[in-house]
Structure formats: structure tokens, C-alpha cells
Image: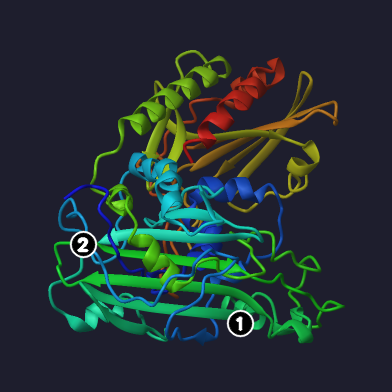
Amino acid sequence: MNEDDGAVRGLLGTAFADAEPPLRDLASGSIARGDGQRRRNRMFAVGGATLSAVAVMGTFALVSGATPGRHGNQGPANQVTSAASSANPSGKLPFGPAGGSVQKALDVKWQLPGLLQPLLPQGITAGAPATDFSPDPRSPALLTGATGTNQVTMWVGTAPTSQADVLKAIPCPSKMDCQTKAVQGGTVYIHQGSTTAADALRDGGDHYPADTLKASAAKTIAAEDLSVTFVPDDRSKYEFNIEMSTTTAKFQYAEHEPSDYPTGEAWPPDLNRNDSSFDPAGLMVSADDVVAMLAKPGMNRLESLLDPNTAVSKGTQDKFTQTASQIVAAAAPALPAGVKAGIETSMMQVNMVVTGSTGKNVVTWETGSQSRYRQNINWCPPNVNCSNKAVPGGTLEVWAEKPMDSKGTISTDGFSSYEYWFFPDDASKPGVTMTLETDASRTGVPVQVITPPGQTYSETDGPYALPQVSADQFAAAAQSGQLSAAIAQATPLLATLQ
């Protein structure tokens, strides 16, 4: 079979099985990004929780019959009636999303827009999302149309040969209304839903009370979502799924702070700032548009790319290697003799590390306004040893942090991270900060684990490596300007791998 032969798949709503993509977005800042990200966020002193209206599911609308195209698409698709065949998967895949390596995720990120573009209805452009990696193995893209953007995720798998209950439970989990259609070559499962502003606020957690919103805006449709799955009769073929979602309305807040509003939180909240996509006209592509899209030539190339077991392209491998080498070279002038920078991948994240004679640290660094860094500097958490001293040209602040379990018990085994800040005497000049993660038992940034009540979890297990850059060495690099120069060069390079 030619690689470009058409392949109609279906598209799945597993996004809403255990953690919808918007809910995963919500959680990623505090759960999936790990200790290093959490420490960096602490210095921004951003109060309150974040919430994406796309995150949650409220009132569902069952799809029935053919659905018209949106946003002026030329020639809406016909009713779903058939499905074409496809190339075989690389091997047995799970009946659900499966993760691969960071290099594979980058391969998908860089190639997905180009392979998806010719499959889309007219007037819609595919691009890479402007977000960091998370452990989510689904492959994201951003669709842009005349009035806004939609978030889309896709993955391929293989369905079991029997277990009819499982076959429906994956695309149509509990509390999800799903339409099932028998088509030539398999079965299509379709869900389309919408979420009100009140539902989005409530389902996002108990942090904000219902009267945070204007009463007149509570029933406004705040988000729309679509999921479809094609399960082939021939289980040797790919199961394919896609999910689309978008925020359709911004939160509108009450005129005054409610009496039951969380104490100490900023008013009004800014719950609109982290929307992964926004389009007041709703979803750009209907279920029938999607199935018609997947019948076009080139679909097999997209399926092969999404398969976590297929080879990473040489272009991606070369780009990764070259970028890593450039980061190492950019960081070198700011590091002490005998300490070398490197790039390490784990837990679907790309981290910069520094290695010296006594161990290895995951390192993050940046420059920023002194006012931003200084706002929490007079506060010292109970599990942190804080100190500061005057150095030539400014002030050096040092935090040495001990890990703490979910019950607040502070470890006595050693320090899990060191954070340095240099504040120039000239307040108009930017400050510089560096964090060194010292847990030598892990190859990447640890993930915070949410435990059941009564259970404890130690964020780090040790043993703890010494910091490969001392506070005085950091201060010397900051004073000379070498550190700021290294950060300016290395940061955009690292961003291309995230």
C-alpha cells in the first residue's frame, strides 16, 4: 500500500477519561513540572490558582446526524458513512495514549503541523502550541482560524480483539454522552459538549466560590469540546483519536469581592490568563469535517509520526544534538573550572545539568527585574536556611532547602536544592538567579506526588550531591556579567527543546 493512501480513522475523547487536557494544563504548573519549576514559580509571588475554562466538562450536547462545518469552511463534510484502510502500526500499542522519548515528542512537535495542514478544511492553519512539554503522551497542535484558536490533541493505538465493554469505555467514559456509529471498516464514537462558566469555575476546584462570577454570566457557554474515536474492525490497523477544545467566553467577575472569597487573594482574579486556546465562535471543525479530513491522502504519514515506536527523523536527531552542543558552549564561560554543562532528558522533560568532580545538579537560571525577585526575599520558609551578605557591586542571597513530606516533616538528610540571587546595588539593573537541584538519585526534576489523606511522600529521596557551583562562584560570574551573557544565549536555545 502506498504511504499516502487515504485512511479514515475516528477520533477519541479519552481526554476526558481520567484528566481532560485542560485539567492537565491546570495541574501541570503545580504537579507535573516538578520541584524545580515549583521553586522558580515561588519567586513570582503569583497568588491564587489558575483555571482554564476549557479544562472542565459541564453540560453535554449529544451529536446527532451530520454536523455543519464552522468558520466558513468550504464544503462541510457529509454524514460519516465509511472508513478507509491504513498502514499497519509498528507493533502492538496500548488502547490509549503511550509516551515515547523526548526526542520522539520533539519529532512530533516539529513535524505535526506540516503533516496536519493539508488534511484540514480550508481557512484553518496548524501550528505548534506555545507551551512547555508535560508528561502527557498525546500530541498537541494549535489550530488558528479567522476568529481565534482551537487546541487539538491526537494519538494512535491498537484496540483489543474483544472486550466490547472496554472498547466503548475508553472513548466513552462514565458521565460522557457518546454517539456510536457503525461505519465501513469499524466503529466511530463521537462526543461533543459544552461547559458553562459556572461549571468551569466549580469543576476547577473549590478555591473560588460561585459568586466570584457575575450572576448574569454564570450560564454563559465558556468552552466547547469535541472528541471522536475510530476503532477498526481489523485490529491490526491503527486506532486513531483526536480531541479539540476551545474557550469561548472569558470569565466575567462580580462587581465586588464576595464575602466568601478566599482571604488574601487578589481581586479580581485573573483566571483567563492561561487559556490554551480561545475562539468566541467555538470549534472550527465538526465531527464530520474531521472524519472527511482523515480520509485524505497523507493521513498515513501522520499516523506513522504519532506512533511512539517509529523512528525519530534524522533531522530531529541532528537538531537536538546541535542545540545541546550550543547550550553547553554558551554556558561554559559562566561556570567554574572543572564544571561542565550538559542536557539531560527524563520524564518527558529537557533539563540543563552541571557536572563536577563531586556530582551532578539540575540547574535553572534566569535574569529579571529586582522588584520581582525581591518581593518574597524577606520571607524564609521553615525548611529553608536563608542568608545574605554584601558582595562587591551588590547583595548575594542564598537559600538552602531541605525536602519536606506531605505532613510538613522536614528531612534531616541533606539539602535538596540551593538557590542563589545576586542583586546589583543599582536597582535599575536586572537581578540574576540560579537554582541547583542536588538530589543525585534522580536524573531529572522530581515530580510532586499528591497522596491520599494520611499518607506521606518525601519529595526527594537522596542521596544529595553537593552544589557544583558555590554561592561565591555564582556571585563572581554574576558580577562579571558572564552569567547574564550565558543565560541570554542558552535560554532561547533550551526553549527550542521544550
Q: Residue at x 60, y 70 (%)?
A: 282
User: Which labelled disc corresponds to residue 30?
Assistant: none
The percent position of residue 490, horizontal first and vertical second, equals 56, 26
Query: What's the amino acid at mark 1?
Result: Asp
Given residues 161 and 205, the one toward you in this image is 161
Of the two numbered discs 2 and 1 in the rendering, the one whose residue sits closer to the viewer: 2
What residue does disc 1 label?
A: 199
Q: Residue at x 63, y 22 (%)?
A: 483
Q: Earlier in the sequence, mark 2 or mark 1?
A: 2
- Residue 355 visible: no
Given residues 104 and 190, the one toward you in this image is 190
Given residues 139 and 340, the one toward you in this image is 139
The percent position of residue 404, horizontal first and vertical second, equals 50, 55
Image vertical order of residue 354 relative to residue 53, above or below: above
Colour mode of the rendering: rainbow
The number of numbered discs placed on residues in the rendered structure image is 2
Tag 2 secondary structure: loop
Image vertical order of residue 434 relative to residue 213, above or below: above
Q: Residue at x 43, y 86 (%)?
A: 64
Image vertical order of residue 294 relative to residue 354, above or below: below
Residue 300 shown left or right of residue 261 in the figure: left
- Residue 259 visible: yes
The percent position of residue 484, horizontal first and vertical second, equals 66, 24
**Residue farthest front in this picture:** 75
Circle 2 crowding by C-alpha within 10 Å: few under 14, some 14–19, many from 20: many
Tag 1 secondary structure: helix
What residue does disc 2 label?
A: 85
Query: What's the amino acid at mark 2?
Result: Ser
Residue 197 shown left or right of residue 97 in the figure: right
